């Protein structure tokens, strides 16, 4: 304890000696830190702080922009500014308070605060022109061209699609008071690179290069495909006509009605009775018996495909025939390697440790499903392809190219929606898929930052993929989880990254999210569903343009 006390005594003696050396006339007195001053206009508006922090030296500098409020056309006038400080601190000019000063010229002020001797300083202001020379927005709205501004490289990637639209005028937004050459009123041919020079208010110049690039995202003739989880007895939805209605059409609060989703992916991971249709979900693997049962569940008289067809039929009298064919994609059960009890095919007991037997089972499912689908003669839906239910390729990569070729022989397509960073997601074409959508996997974990959506969109662009939107019932207004903002982030970031304009989108909504949103009476839910539905409806004009004649 003696050593500690000695240490504290030494510290106190050092502090005391520093204070005593500060100013001779203040010896023996404690000084508090002087309060910071600030300036406002004479009427109290505005709030400006000096460049220096306390304690102030001989000179105090204020720096102002050329206009106030910033971005306005109103030039700033600092000829009568009011200098103040918080609390009981007084700022005076020539002994007079309040202190009004012309900051266009040096002025001596006195700052008086309790516990401190009055201090004199020269205060002066500077009106400084902005050095910001930045393009903050660039687009060509006449034809819907969006862009990505890569600020570090001073490159603007203009997504022009695959058409030559001639000379067009861009919409450009700049830093306040900056100018640009060529002027934004000048039409340009954006199929070639164009250089723009941005000049800041103080003359600083920055050069940007506008480069035409393809959109990058993948786009097929399914604009918006919703995932329909159906089959397992554990599912809360039987997918009747009434349950499909809010997925087939959207009716706004004014009574306006439009077609909504144009694609429907039917998939299932497990039967709810101990058997799984993909590896890793339950201990038991689905056998031929469960594969047939899964098909039976989809071909019921009043659910699944029949109910979807009936829902579309019920709205045609009011809306007319849709400008697109509603497409159905069927989840393909995974022949899980090593399984011995799948069953027999053509009198042969299949062994899934053999690649050839796994292919035989998958081919049988594809053929049987197509035959049963065609036999139904649905009026308003058509089979578009099959979906690989396994969200990575760790187990069955050796089957995929063969399955893709086999599916395409029947004029169908092979699809995939890998999870974030799944094995093989960056080489989906090489694996044999016709198209893939990328899962961002952002919604489900509050610890995943919104920036994941930017990264996922960039990955989708780089690899020619569509994107998946993800949410579930936790986005409903009364949900205690507060995940609503995470769905809103998807909408915001898909807008920002031009996903709605250029990419096919798959929608994971928890198996009944849209249904519950449509049944909610909460104004917040109606507003959010309306925002999402409006995006889906507007996209149809780009994916399914109506003939001019």
Image (spheres, grey):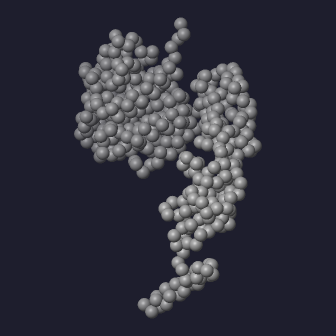
**Number of numbered discs overlaid on the protein picture:** 0
Q: Residue at x 41, y 33 (%)?
A: 507
Q: Please state the horizontal and vertical placement of residue 5, each as a whole percent of the image.
A: 46, 89
Asked if 291 appears above or below 94 in the picture, the reply is: above
Residue 131 lies, with reference to residue 156, above or below; the image says: below
Give percent across and percent down for residue 522. 30, 33
Answer with left or right where residue 188 lies relative to residue 398.
right
Furthest-top residue in this view? 549
Q: Residue at x 37, y 31 (%)?
A: 527
Report which quarter residue 259 is drawn in.
Answer: top left
Q: Nearer the viewer, residue 304 or 102?
A: 102
Residue 129 spot, x, y in % from top left: 70, 46
Residue 101 in view:
yes
Q: Is residue 182 left or right of residue 238?
A: right
Residue 131 lies, with reference to residue 179, above or below; the image says: below
**Quadrant of residue 485 in the image?**
top left
* Residue found at the very far bottom of the displayed protein: 2
Task: Determine the residue positioned at 70% across, 24% down.
Answer: 187
Residue 60 location (% of width, % of height): 66, 61
Q: Is residue 465 visible?
A: no
């Amino acid at each position: 304890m003696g050593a500690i006390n000695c240490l504290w005594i030494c510290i106190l003696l050092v502090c005391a000696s520093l204070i005593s050396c500060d100013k001779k006339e203040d010896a023996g007195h404690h000084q508090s830190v002087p309060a910071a001053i600030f300036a406002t206009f004479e009427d109290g508006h505005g709030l400006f702080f000096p460049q220096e922090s306390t304690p102030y030296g001989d000179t105090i500098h204020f720096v102002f922009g050329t206009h106030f409020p910033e971005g306005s056309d109103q030039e700033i006038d600092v000829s009568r500014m009011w200098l103040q400080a918080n609390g009981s601190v007084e700022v005076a000019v020539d002994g007079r308070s309040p202190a009004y000063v012309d900051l266009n010229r040096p002025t001596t002020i006195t700052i008086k605060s309790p516990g401190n001797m009055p201090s004199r300083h020269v205060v002066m202001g500077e009106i400084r022109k902005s050095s910001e020379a930045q393009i903050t927005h660039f687009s060509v709205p006449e034809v819907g061209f969006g862009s990505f501004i890569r600020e570090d490289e001073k490159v603007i990637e203009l997504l022009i699609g695959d058409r030559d639209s001639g000379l067009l005028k861009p919409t450009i937004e700049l830093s306040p008071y900056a100018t640009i050459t060529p002027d934004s009123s000048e039409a340009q041919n954006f199929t070639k690179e164009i250089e723009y020079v941005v000049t800041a208010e103080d003359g600083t110049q920055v050069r940007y290069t506008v480069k035409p690039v393809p959109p990058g995202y993948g786009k097929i003739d399914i604009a918006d495909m919703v995932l329909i989880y159906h089959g397992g007895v554990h599912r809360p939805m039987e997918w009747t006509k009434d349950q499909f209605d809010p997925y087939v059409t959207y009716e706004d609060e004014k009574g306006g009605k439009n077609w909504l989703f144009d694609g429907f992916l039917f998939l299932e991971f497990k039967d709810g009775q101990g058997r799984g249709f993909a590896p890793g979900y339950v201990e038991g693997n689905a056998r031929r018996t469960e594969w047939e049962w899964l098909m039976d569940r989809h071909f019921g008289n009043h659910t699944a495909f029949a109910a979807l067809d009936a829902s579309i039929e019920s709205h045609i009298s009011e809306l007319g025939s849709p400008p697109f064919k509603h497409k159905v994609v069927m989840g393909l059960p995974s022949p899980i390697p090593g399984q011995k009890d799948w069953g027999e095919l053509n009198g042969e007991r299949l062994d899934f440790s053999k690649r050839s037997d796994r292919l035989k089972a998958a081919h049988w499912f594809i053929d049987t499903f197509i035959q049963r689908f065609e036999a139904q003669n649905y009026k308003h839906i058509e089979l578009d392809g099959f979906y690989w239910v396994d969200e990575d390729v760790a187990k069955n990569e050796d089957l995929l190219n063969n399955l893709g070729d086999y599916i395409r022989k029947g004029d169908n397509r092979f699809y995939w929606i890998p999870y974030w960073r799944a094995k093989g997601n960056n080489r989906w074409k090489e694996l044999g898929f016709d198209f893939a959508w990328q899962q961002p996997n952002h919604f489900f974990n509050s610890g995943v930052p919104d920036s994941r959506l930017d990264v996922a969109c960039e990955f989708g662009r780089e690899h020619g993929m569509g994107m998946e939107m993800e949410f579930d019932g936790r986005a409903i207004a009364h949900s205690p989880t507060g995940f609503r903002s995470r769905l809103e982030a998807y909408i915001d970031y898909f807008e920002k990254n031009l996903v709605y304009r250029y990419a096919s989108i798959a929608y994971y909504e928890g198996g009944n999210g849209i249904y519950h949103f449509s049944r909610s009476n909460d104004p917040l839910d109606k507003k959010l569903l309306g925002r999402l539905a409006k995006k889906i409806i507007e996209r149809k004009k780009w994916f399914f343009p109506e003939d001019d004649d």
